[in-house]
């Protein structure tokens, strides 16, 4: 598993420091405080987020990086001896997996409860959403009219037959979207929708969200499901290939006349066996502060979870404000397994 650890002082080095202090006749230095952060995030802008925290508190951030599902599994396998203090990952479906694996501790924090909207955090405090992303419909401006992609249901309408590109039905982003439909409309309607989208496929599910945008740009299909940050990343990119990809692309925020566009989170939780619990709680609370919120969200072209904050991000700003589905995110976790069963049943591979 590709995991990169940023080194902390080793016991031998700590002992050497202690010895040096004793020899100099000075009081021994206290063990430096640290938070072991298990994270799937690897954005340049996050460096500033961590260094600002260390500057303000003297607590070092020791990052252990890996892929989302692998990090959860690693903490589970490490068990009581895990050095993990905080798990940081993306999508409610994965926070749910971590919760179900029993690796997260319920945390009561007045700071987090006041700062973060109730629908973006676990009532029991096992996970907290720190930024949001929306799952939207990307489409070719010259071939699709906005009123053809006003709702998620439109993706299943006969008008888009042979024109829809999507990634796998076992990917957490699609599972979470379908789970939100199960929660809002029931299994029967959710299954009918999934079946309708499968009937409209331009090609078998493949690639990631950016690959769907590439396929639209290349004329292989006209519409696709994408998370907003992939689109915004391309919009903000100076690269010629990205400029060419988005030139004829637009995104629609589905469900504006209904319950709103599906929104998910990047989030974190306190690990049950955290060896540095107090420092870990300080870090989680720091992430909900104004400056940290802006850095955290902007690092991946997302929106801060704290209301009323604006990032200086032209691509994100171009999406404007829109109505979001404020469904209890815990329901999205709860319906993951049903969502997978439906995708399997209708052949959304
Ligand atoms: Fe992603």
Image: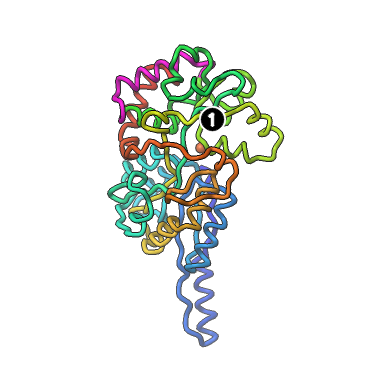
- Up/down of 143 relative to 225, above or below: above
Residue sitting nearer the eye, 100 or 324: 324
Residue at the (56%, 57%) spot, across then down: 48
Looking at the image, can residue 103 be seen?
A: no
x 47%, y 31%: residue: 253
Residue at the far bottom: name it: 25
Residue 316 vs 250, above or below: the answer is below
| Magenta stretch: dominant secondary structure | helix
**Foreground pick, 204 / 316:** 316
- Image location of residue 204, percent across then percent down: 51, 18
Looking at the picture, how far across and down is residue 343, in whole percent? 39, 22
Assess whether residue 291 is covered by the magenta stretch.
no
Residue 126 located left or right of residue 240? left
Q: Secondary structure at mark 1?
A: strand
Residue 218, picture quadrant: top right
Asked if disc 1 is less than 8 Å from ligand 1, the answer is: no
192 in the magenta segment = yes
63 lies left or right of 245: left
Pointer 1: what residue? 251
Q: What is the count of numbered marks? A: 1
State which quarter of the image contains the C terminus: top left
x then y, percent, for residue 45: 58, 52
Magenta stretch, residue numbers: 183-204
Q: Which of 69/112 is in front?
A: 112
Q: At 51% across and 87% down in the image, what residue appears?
A: 25
């Amino acid at each position: 598993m590709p995991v990169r650890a940023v080194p902390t002082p080793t016991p031998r080095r700590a002992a050497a420091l202690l010895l040096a202090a004793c020899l100099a006749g000075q009081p021994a230095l206290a063990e430096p405080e640290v938070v072991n952060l298990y994270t799937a995030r690897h954005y340049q802008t996050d460096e500033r987020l961590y260094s600002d925290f260390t500057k303000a508190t003297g607590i070092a951030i020791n990052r252990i990086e890996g892929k989302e599902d692998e990090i959860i599994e690693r903490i589970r396998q490490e068990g009581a001896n895990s050095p993990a203090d905080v798990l940081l990952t993306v999508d409610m479906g994965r926070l749910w997996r971590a919760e179900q694996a029993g690796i997260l501790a319920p945390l009561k924090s007045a700071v987090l409860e006041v700062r973060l909207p109730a629908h973006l955090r676990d009532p029991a405090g096992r996970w907290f959403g720190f930024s949001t992303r929306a799952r939207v419909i990307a489409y070719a401006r010259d071939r699709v009219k906005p009123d053809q992609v006003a709702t998620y249901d439109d993706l299943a309408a006969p008008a888009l037959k042979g024109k829809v590109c999507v990634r796998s039905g076992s990917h957490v982003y699609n599972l979470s979207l379908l789970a939100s439909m199960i929660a809002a409309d029931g299994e029967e309607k959710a299954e009918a929708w999934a079946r309708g989208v499968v009937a409209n496929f331009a090609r078998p599910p493949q690639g990631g969200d950016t690959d769907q945008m590439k396929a639209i740009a290349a004329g292989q299909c006209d519409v696709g499901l994408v998370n907003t940050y992939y689109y915004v990343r391309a919009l903000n990119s100076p690269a010629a290939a990205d400029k060419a990809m988005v030139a004829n692309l637009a995104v629609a925020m589905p469900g504006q006349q209904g319950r709103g566009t599906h929104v998910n989170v990047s989030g974190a939780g306190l690990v049950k066996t955290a060896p540095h619990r107090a420092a870990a709680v300080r870090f989680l609370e720091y992430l909900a502060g104004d400056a940290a919120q802006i850095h955290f969200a902007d690092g991946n072209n997302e929106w801060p979870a704290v209301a009323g904050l604006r990032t200086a991000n032209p691509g994100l700003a171009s999406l404007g404000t829109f109505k979001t589905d404020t469904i209890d995110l815990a329901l999205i976790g709860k319906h993951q397994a049903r969502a997978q069963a439906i995708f399997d049943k209708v052949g959304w591979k």
